[in-house]
Amino acid sequence: MILTDKRILEEIEKGTIIIEPFKPECLGTNSYDVHLGKYLATYKDRVLDAKAHNQIDHFEIPKDGYILQPGTLYLGVTLEYTETHHHVPFLEGKSSTGRLGIDIHATAGKGDVGFCNTWTLEISCAQPVKIYAGMPIGQLIYFTVEGKIENLYNAKQNAKYNNKTTRPVESMMWKNNF
């Protein structure tokens, strides 16, 4: 089941959902709007290797915006830091963002119970589009969990994205054994 606005607020009061900064006007009927942080990143190499640590270049979005180009994968980050201790968070694009031809995640829309961080966005676009730091970029939806949890994400020894950051994080696929 998806949490409603009232239930999200109850969970925030209990401390099982944390959103910083929290703005009441960003709370929808059954979601919370998140915003684009001020940093983007692109990979240094055009060809990426799943077994290698692919390096990225971070840069700040200028105050007058930045034009995304098709054919480039941009890593963005949410302005909001979140913690989810008893629910499964899903990050989805906003329809207004999609109608500009912007995709905010290629495959990683689901978070884990225990995820405590900003969200790295996998941004691509259908045509050139100008974006701005602070613009609404997506929405978090929270699902209830059935059963007890054995391994919270933030307690896992092999969790690859636990380091708190305000910048996008590159793929850590290279840390897997395959």
Image (cartoon, helix red, strand yellow):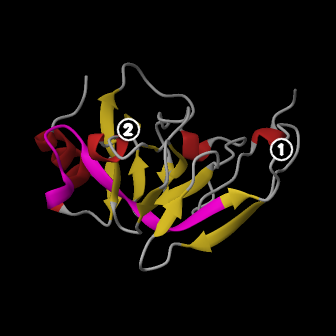
- Residue 98 spot, x, y in % from top left: 36, 41
Q: Using the image as rendered, state which of residue 171 and residue 94 is in the foreground.
A: 94
- Residue 56 spot, x, y in % from top left: 74, 60
| Lateral position of residue 102 relative to residue 169, left or right | left
Type of amino acid under label 1: Val
Give, as a single range, the part of the protein colored magenta.
25-41
Q: Is residue 29 magenta?
A: yes
Alpha-carbon span between mark 1 and mark 2: 27 Å
Q: Using the image as rendered, state which of residue 119 and residue 38 is in the foreground.
A: 38
Specify few, some or many for label 1: CA neighbours under 10 Å numbering under 14, 14-19, or 20 or more.
few
Vertical comparison of 101 with 19: above or below: above
Find disc 1 in the rendering and name its residue. 47
Furthest toward the front, the residue is 127
| Lateral position of residue 129 relative to residue 22, left or right | right
Q: Residue at x 80, y 58 (%)?
A: 55
Checking the image for residue 92, the label placed there is 2
Q: Residue at x 16, y 45 (%)?
A: 28
